[in-house]
Image: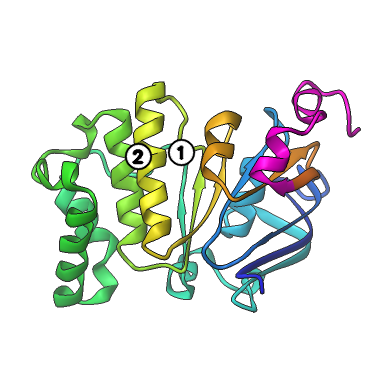
Amino acid sequence: MSLLKVDQLVAGYEPGLPIVRGASIRVAPGEIVAVLGPNGAGKSTLIKAIAGLVRVESGEVRFRGQDLRRLPAHRLVRAGLAFVPQTENVFANLTIQENLELAGFFLGRRRCQERVRAMFELFPDLARQRALAAGRLSGGQRQMLAVARALLVEPGMIMLDEPSAGLSPRLVAEVFAKLAEVRAEGTTILMVEQNVKAALALADRAYVLTEGRERLSGSAAELRSHGDLASLFLGGAGR
């Protein structure tokens, strides 16, 4: 059974100029699924369309059976779907604690404080610096805070747009190790990634997009050994 079901999605930023051109993906409960592809393949547009931030021209997007196209973006959190954008994903002038409290404002004060404590247990490095402004965090710490903010409301699934962007290999390893912990706690993950090696080491399954369509899909192990993977990234096979 699919938690998220996307069928023949056509989406883009301008009417009649689609960037995603008929992509279909599935995410089952408890999975980590990666969406891979070269620059310009439509990966980020796909995940933003699911999150209600990009115009959907046609196709189907269902989460827990609910048609997401009928929901405004700000109501997706209440539906159980959280999104972590690639950039501007924390409030730089607020402290770590204030960022978390703001994310859970609609939970009520008592429940919000319970969830903030839970996030500090899951992310002890953030707990040690809770009074620090988010703008002073390293790239890896900022990404951890963005993930913690998304998890605070206990979503059924979290979507991440390029969580490794701009990070050193050491920080990528730290962030991805934390994502493995997040999944172990029961949260499903859909992630767009440019770092193919790291993504396939973490994910259960993956899709490869080129020109707005999925060209390959399968288990992470299958894609690691697939002969067409490199050529798809270079614009060869699959056209």
Q: Is residue 138 magenta?
A: no
Who's the residue at 27% across and 66% down the image? 104
Amino acid residing under circle 1:
Pro
Q: Nearer the viewer, residue 72 or 21?
A: 21
Quick check: can you spot residue 94? Answer: no
Q: Is residue 222 above or below residue 31?
A: above
Residue 192: where, in percent of width, then height?
Answer: 58, 42
| Dot 2 and dot 1 residues touching (CB under 8 Å) | yes
Q: Residues within 10 Å of mark 2 (few under 14, many from 20)?
A: many
Picture quadrant where residue 197 is located: top right
Start-end of magenta stretch: 218-239
State left or right for residue 218 relative to residue 122. Answer: right
Q: Which residue is labeled 2 in the image? A: 143
Above or below for 82 versus 19: below
At 81% from the left edge and 36% from the top edge, which residue is drawn? 211
| Front residue of 124 and 133 | 124
Left or right: residue 231 versus residue 150 is right
The residue lying toward the viewer, choosing from 25 and 186, is 186
Q: Which residue is pictured at 38% across the width and 41% down the height?
A: 177
Q: Who is closer to the viewer here, 96 or 226? A: 226
Q: Position of residue 145 (x, y in %)?
A: 28, 45
- The label shown at residue 163 is 1
Q: Is residue 87 left or right of residue 102?
A: right
- The amino acid marked with disc number 2 is Gln
Does residue 219 show up magenta in the picture? yes
Say which quarter of the image contains residue 200: top right
Q: Quadrant of the C terminus?
A: top right
How far across and how far down the image is residue 118, in percent?
A: 20, 62
